[in-house]
Every structure is written in C-alpha cells, then in structure tokens.
Image (tube, rainbow, N blue to C red):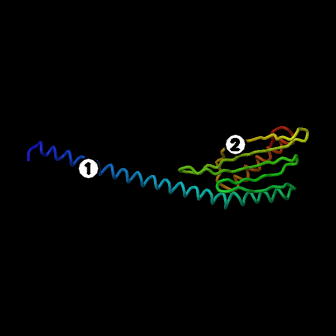
Amino acid sequence: MSDWQAELGKIFTDIEQHRQELAELARRRQRQEQERADRTVGQRLGAERFARDVIEPLLRDIAAELGKHGRRASVGGDGLTRWIEVAVESGGVFRYELILEPQPAYVVLRRHNSAIARFPDETPGTHQLVLRKSIAVATAEDITRDFVQEYREYLWVAHFGAPSPL
C-alpha cells in the first residue's frame, strides 16, 4: 500500500473516530442533563417537605402563642410557600410569608412581609407596606427569631410611627 492510500484510509478512520467521540459526548451531556433534572426535582421535593414538615408546624406554634396574647392568627400556604397572617387592632393584617426557591446547589428562603392596615380616618382604602428580603436561615429557631423581629418592628411602627429601639 502506498502512502497516499494509507493517508486516504486514515481520513475515513479519523472521521469515524470523531463521529464516535461526538456521539459519546452527546450521551454524556444527556446523562448530565438528566442527573441535573433529577437533582432539581429532588431539591424541590426536599424543599416542599421542609415547608410542610418544618415551616408550617412552626408557624402554627407561633399562631398558638399569639393566641395566648389575644391575637388572631391564621396559617396557610402550599408547595414552596407558607405564611402566617395576624389580625391587627386597626383592622388590618400583618402577613409574614416564606418562599422556598430551590436552586441547582442550594435552596433560598425568601421572606415577604406585607402589612396592610386600614385607617379609620380615611375613606375605604389600604396602606400597604411591603418588605422583601432574602434570609439565609436553615433552622426553625432562625425563622422564629426573624418572625419575632419583623413582627416587633411592625408593631412599633404601627403604634409609635418609628422603628423599635430594641
């Protein structure tokens, strides 16, 4: 066999080898995408379990404790969101909402406070204060502490028109 024949044969061998490498790369990429999708589903299910098994009972405990202080509170939510609403003396509602956001490598817990207060000297209308903040919390104690802090702030502003000095 002459050099040119060997060179010609090598072209077809190289092409076939490259096709096989591309096919293997495509299979590997597909496996990685499936593994990533599986992890995302697992993270979402884990986050939903955390919301259901940790956050919701915790908010129910907070509502029960508020009841001991003469406050009406209700708990709700589904999926990745849980909230507690506390009736305010002015006829408004303080809402503390936790939203879990699964990410590829972690879960973000976002808090959304919405305080809606109706003022008797105004025509029917609402004043809404909305605070959004990410909180890097992982324990029930951290969530409880954050709720108490935010509820204290809300009450001080509602009653005294200024942030809590505490």
Q: CA distance from mark 1 to mark 2?
A: 55 Å
Identified by mark 2, the residue type is Arg
> Which quadrant holds residue 66?
bottom right
121 left or right, relative to 138: right
Could you tell me residue 40's position as x and y percent? 53, 54
Could you tell me residue 12's position as x and y percent? 21, 47
Residue furthest front in the image: 124
Q: Secondary structure at mark 2?
A: strand
Could you tell me residue 41's position as x and y percent? 54, 56
| Residue under the image location 42 percent in, 55 percent down | 31
Disc marking residue 132: 2
In the rendered image, the vertical position of residue 148 relative to residue 126, given as above or below: below
Answer few, some or many: residues within 10 Å of disc 2's Cα (few below 14, many 20 plus, some between 14 and 19).
few
Q: Which residue is mark 1?
A: 17
| Residue under the image location 41 percent in, 51 percent down | 29
Q: Secondary structure at mark 1?
A: helix
5 left or right, relative to 95: left
> Which quadrant holds residue 61?
bottom right
Disc marking residue 9: none
Q: Earlier in the sequence, mark 1 or mark 2?
A: 1
> Which quadrant holds residue 134?
top right
Q: Nearer the viewer, residue 66 or 90?
A: 90
